[in-house]
Image (cartoon, helix red, strand yellow):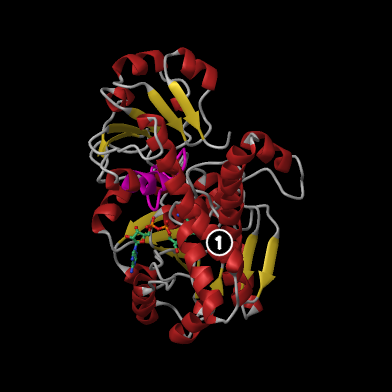
């Protein structure tokens, strides 16, 4: 059984957000004894009661099962990690607009840990950190420190943690690497052992490449429009080539979320610092900003009938606020980037998102909890997140409620024919 595994490790997890809480619950599930630590006392109180503050399928069940058998606990006190054999750092590492990384939370955690940890404890950096941070942390702590980046997708966090595409272990000492490998005993995935710098850089390289793919296909939406092509078929042509792959080729309002934008900025900054020209990355970022503007241009034209029409004072309804379907995360959401531009142009915005609560603060958008409320008296609807349930809305009823039944589908999600039959003027990107 789970609680009797021979190689059971005593594990500490610092930071209990998307990555930390998922890691803590899954490592307890794999049979380890895990303590999650967070500076947010309210969050710790919630977690102790088995209440999970983020929307991740299966996470609540795992947390409650492991709380119940005592293999998982939560505290605000880093001193609780004194007996840990492995400590995972999962604190936020936000990136400023100039590409420099804010390591205050990370450094604060490291500083506190240095007084607490056992000499033999192996420190594992799961946070995404600039190249060199693992070696610097090893020196600061005087303990073996290993880079082990996390690749989970929000909305699939538990699944991805337990079924990763790869486990990357960047270490200078084989024994420390062995201990990290032992954490994942029972998970089947290729394990890549490398030195810390490669591990750190590999994480940025992977995320930035995904951003690049999306920007590539988004530029093709504009080109398709100009040349009379259908971007959906252009993208499908690419997808059918296994060398290109099927993922991250859906046209949309731009890439976003809590990782891609910040990791791309950080990688570009690292390249600049190192004197390496990474123009394709800068171009992908510029194309992303351009894509937000393109959605606004579409909306302007669709709603006013003219490329220079004014949006001032017009009520627009937004369908989708999160950066992608299946999550409650709105950090650096392209939907909100588009919303900001629409608001700048004077539009008055109401938004509905299945993952976002009415009480959420996503100014300038007024959040409602019912899609009919975004349609009511609207001059146009803008679909910004690919929630499949938007397809099944009662579009005839929405058309009744709208002032001008017009929809701009920035995700190519809706069935044009059905929405048009319901009475909407239907617009989208890439045709
Ligand atoms: P998050 O904001 O969801 O959670 C971070 C948690 O750390 C919060 O609960 C916060 O209260 C806590 N915290 C902050 N400072 C602390 C401190 N000094 N001591 C203890 N706890 C502290 O962040 P996240 O999305 O889980 O991201 C964490 C790291 O993982 C980042 O470096 C991120 O780039 C990386 N990452 C995130 C994802 C993702 O999908 N979210 C995927 C891969 C990697």
Residue 219 drawn at (x, y percent): 58, 48
Q: Is residue 310 left or right of residue 185?
A: left
Write down the quadrant of residue 115 in the picture: bottom left
Q: 346 or 238: nearer the eye? A: 346
| Residue 203 is at least partly visible in this image | no
Mark 1 lies within 8 Å of ligand 1 (Cβ measured): no
Using the image, determine if residue 402 lies above or below residue 273. Answer: above
Q: Is residue 362 magenta?
A: no
Write down the quadrant of residue 207 in the picture: bottom right
Ligand 1 location (quadrant): bottom left
Q: Which residues are magenta?
A: 322-340
Q: Is residue 332 left or right of residue 162?
A: left
Crowd rating for badge 1 (residues with CA inside 10 Å; few <14, some 14–19, many 20+)? some
Identify residue for label 1: 283
The residue that appears at 33% across and 69% down in the rendered structure is 78
The residue that appears at 32% across and 14% down in the rendered structure is 400
Residue 106 drawn at (x, y percent): 39, 72
The residue that appears at 38% across and 62% down in the rendered structure is 15
| Residue 154 is at least partly visible in this image | yes
Q: Is residue 328 magenta?
A: yes
């Amino acid at each position: 059984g789970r609680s009797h595994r021979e190689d059971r490790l005593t594990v500490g997890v610092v930071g209990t957000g998307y990555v930390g809480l998922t890691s803590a619950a899954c490592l307890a599930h794999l049979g380890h004894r895990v303590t999650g630590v967070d500076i947010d006392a309210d969050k710790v109180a919630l977690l102790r009661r088995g209440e999970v503050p983020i929307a991740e399928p299966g996470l609540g069940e795992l947390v409650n099962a492991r709380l119940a058998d005592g293999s998982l606990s939560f505290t605000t006190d880093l001193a609780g990690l004194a007996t840990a054999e492995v400590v995972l750092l999962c604190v936020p590492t936000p990136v400023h607009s100039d590409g420099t990384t804010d390591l205050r939370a990370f450094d604060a955690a490291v500083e506190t840990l240095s007084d607490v940890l056992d000499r033999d404890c192996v420190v594992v950096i799961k946070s995404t950190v600039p190249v060199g941070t693992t070696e610097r942390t090893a020196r600061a702590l005087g303990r073996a420190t290993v880079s082990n980046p996390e690749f989970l997708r929000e909305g699939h966090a538990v699944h991805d943690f337990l079924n990763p595409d790869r486990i990357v272990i960047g270490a200078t000492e084989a024994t420390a690497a062995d201990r990290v490998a032992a954490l994942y005993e029972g998970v089947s995935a290729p394990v890549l052992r490398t030195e810390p710098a490669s591990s750190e850089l590999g994480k940025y390289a992977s995320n930035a490449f995904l951003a690049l793919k999306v920007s590539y296909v988004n530029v093709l939406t504009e080109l398709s429009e100009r040349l009379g092509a259908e971007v959906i078929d252009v993208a499908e042509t690419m997808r059918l080539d296994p060398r290109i792959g099927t993922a991250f080729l859906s046209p949309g309002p731009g890439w976003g979320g809590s990782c891609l934008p910040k990791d791309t900025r950080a990688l570009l900054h690292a390249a600049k610092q190192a004197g390496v020209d990474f123009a394709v990355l800068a171009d992908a970022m510029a194309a992303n900003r351009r894509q937000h503007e393109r959605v606004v241009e579409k909306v302007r034209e669709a709603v006013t009938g003219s490329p220079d029409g004014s949006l001032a004072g017009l009520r627009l309804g937004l369908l989708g606020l999160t950066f992608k379907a299946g999550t409650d995360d709105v950090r650096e959401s392209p939907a909100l980037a588009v919303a900001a531009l629409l608001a700048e142009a004077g539009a008055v915005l109401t938004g509905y998102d299945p993952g976002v609560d009415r009480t959420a603060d996503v100014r300038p958008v007024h959040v409602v909890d019912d899609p009919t409320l975004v349609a009511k008296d609207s001059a146009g609807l803008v679909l910004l997140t690919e929630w499949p349930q938007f397809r099944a809305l009662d579009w005839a009823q929405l058309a009744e409620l709208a002032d001008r039944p017009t929809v701009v589908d920035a995700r190519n999600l809706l069935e044009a024919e059905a929405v048009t039959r319901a009475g909407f003027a239907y617009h989208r990107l890439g045709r």
